[in-house]
Image (cartoon, grey):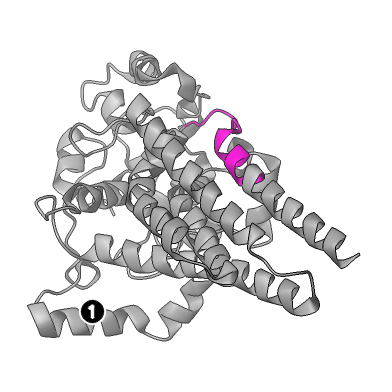
Amino acid sequence: TTASYTIMLRLAMLGMVVAMGGALRAPLPPSRLPSSFVTSSLIPRTSSPLSSKPANTYAKPVNLRMGKAVLEEVGQELDGQGRAKATDYFKPLVEGDILVSTNEQKAIVGVSYFLLAALAVKGIWMLPELSASTMIATLSAVALGYEFADFGSGVYHWAMDNYGTKNTPVFGTQIEAFQGHHELPWTITYRQVCNNIYKICQATSPFCLAGILLLDNPYLILWMTTAICFINLSQELHKWSHMSPSQVSAWINFLQDWNVIVSRKSHLAHHRPPFDGNYCIVSGHCNSLLDNSGFFRGLESIVFSITGNKPRCETNERLLQDRVESLGIKSKGAR
């Protein structure tokens, strides 16, 4: 009956919500320093002063659950070259930043996804009786929410990459972190899940709460649920695009190979100075449209007309390049 199919649809969508939550908990294979696939696309290994040994020397698997012991172990194995400490090679460049998830970060992510699940349940149970129009509207809401997350990740990424400094109110630490990622892109592969996404979850939780309290259109709710879910996960999808196929689960490789989530090839194109395109890090579907249409160049023109500030992709300013060179991680002038 129609009622039975409606119940089945709702149960299926609830299953998707549970599956998305499970994806956060599912253990990935241990992260390690990117293989030659990644390093050859980003940082020429031959320019590293850490050691004259082959690149595979640094590809030892590391168990993220070891916490601080990870960096200590790597340091003990690779230090002693008389230049940069190996821990500097693996650590984030932002002062005080860490790679392991704290209890506070786990709590923030937990609350965020509890609210997100509540929002999803509200939207699912408000759906009308099953019909062709209901199915089309539901799938459209989910698809549009997913692509909006991709678009939003690109706009935010562009803004953090091109404007402000570590002293910028509210966004300063994120701006500095984005610049650090350009210099040492492999450090993101060491971040545990909650450490990687908690800042975004913190920002989106109020929107989840507002949706729960104020919205009554099921399709708008499902659009919002999908958008927030993948905005929250954008940094994790970003992280996977920096890992080689052997470093992630088979289902992640499948999604990347079929361009369901941002692929390695798509994102690594961003990591070439002057970092002026391929900003979207959820599906990557919006990159061609935004880059080819001159969307970001148009935004930069608007910003310049209002503030007089040029984007970093035009000035080639690298906020943390000198620090990387002073540590000996990159040779002077290396791109």
User: Quick one: 319 or 296, which is closer to the camera?
Assistant: 296
Whole-percent x, y for residue 122 in the image? 57, 56
Q: Amino acid at mark 1?
A: Glu
Vertical comparison of 296 with 162: above or below: below
**Quarter location, residue 189:** top left
Left or right side of 181 for 34: right
Stretch of the chain drawn in magenta: 19-32
Label 1: how many Cα within 10 Å (few below 14, some 14–19, many 20+): many
**Quarter location, residue 283:** bottom right
User: Quick one: 179 or 50, which is closer to the camera?
Assistant: 179
For the point 51% across and 54% down, the residue is 229
Q: Is residue 31 magenta?
A: yes
Q: Residue furthest right?
A: 1
Left or right side of 35 for 330: left
Whole-percent x, y for residue 62 in the image? 49, 23
Whole-percent x, y for residue 319 in the image? 16, 53
Left or right side of 208 for 162: left
Name the residue carrying label 1: 300
Tell me if residue 309 can be seen: yes
